[in-house]
Image (spheres, rainbow, N blue to C red):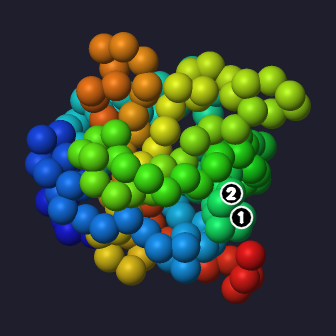
Amino acid sequence: MPADIRTASLRRLRALFASLPPPTEVQRRGFFRASFVGPAWLRWTAPPSLAISGLPGWQGKRFLGPTTATNVVRRAGREVAAMTMQVVPGPSQVDGQPGVALHYLPEAGRPAPMPWRWVRDELRVLDDDTWLCMTVINLPLLRRLSFPFVLRREDAGSGGF
């Protein structure tokens, strides 16, 4: 990951995101560790914002198959799955370009918990092991914003889906 991306402005991160390709199905395998990027205020507020919205201890995302992923959170010193997502190819809400998004799925017959039912994470490839991602909240006044984070491959999983 380029060193200057960690503290880049939101404008620069959105421009970079628009220039990147979406990950292929083959690239979407294994566990990707998350880190926060962008202005200091965003890097500092992201972890507590995730905690109060239902993902305390968020570590990253694991791709379970070509169409399914889950968040990984740390609980009692262990990393466990939390909140399943559907992998959906299609136009990006950030820039209209072809992309791949993660949509939070209903659980136990109920809609995804709030606010996650309105959230989508969009993925783009920085390099073979690193993705620049944008979280979009699909609600009035918020859907024009996007919040960046980075996913870095930590393992490729067990080989196949």
Query: Where is residue 118 shown, x and y percent of the image?
Result: 53, 26
Drawn side of residue 23 relative to residue 109, left or right:
left
Q: Amino acid at mark 2?
A: Thr
| Cβ–Cβ under 8 Å for marks 2 and 1 | yes
Q: Which of the 4 image quadrants contains residue 68?
A: bottom right
* Tag shown at residue 64: 1
Q: Which of the 4 image quadrants contains residue 157?
A: bottom right
Q: Which of the 4 image quadrants contains residue 142?
A: top left
Of residues 38 and 91, the one drawn nearer to the viewer in this rendering: 91
Instruction: Determine the residue positioned at 56% across, 21% down.
Output: 115
* Tag shown at residue 68: 2
7 over 104 or under it: above or below: below
Instruction: Determine the residue positioned at 42% across, 76% down.
Output: 129
Drawn side of residue 2 relative to residue 89, left or right:
left
Q: Give the Cα distance between marks 2 and 1.
A: 5 Å
Drawn side of residue 60 relative to residue 112, left or right:
left
Of residues 150 and 24, the one drawn nearer to the viewer in this rendering: 24
Of residues 83 and 6, the one drawn nearer to the viewer in this rendering: 83
Label 2, residues with CA under 10 Å away: few <14, some 14-19, many ≥20? some
Q: Amino acid at mark 1?
A: Leu
Query: Where is residue 30 shown, x and y percent of the image?
Result: 62, 72
Q: Specify the quadrant that holds the C terminus.
A: bottom right
Query: Where is residue 60 shown, x and y percent of the image?
Result: 56, 53
- Secondary structure at badge 2 equals strand
Query: Where is residue 62 shown, x and y percent of the image?
Result: 64, 61
Q: Residue furthest top?
A: 140
124 over 50 or under it: above or below: below
Label 1, residues with CA under 10 Å away: few <14, some 14-19, many ≥20? some
Instruction: Determine the residue positioned at 36% across, 14% down.
Output: 140
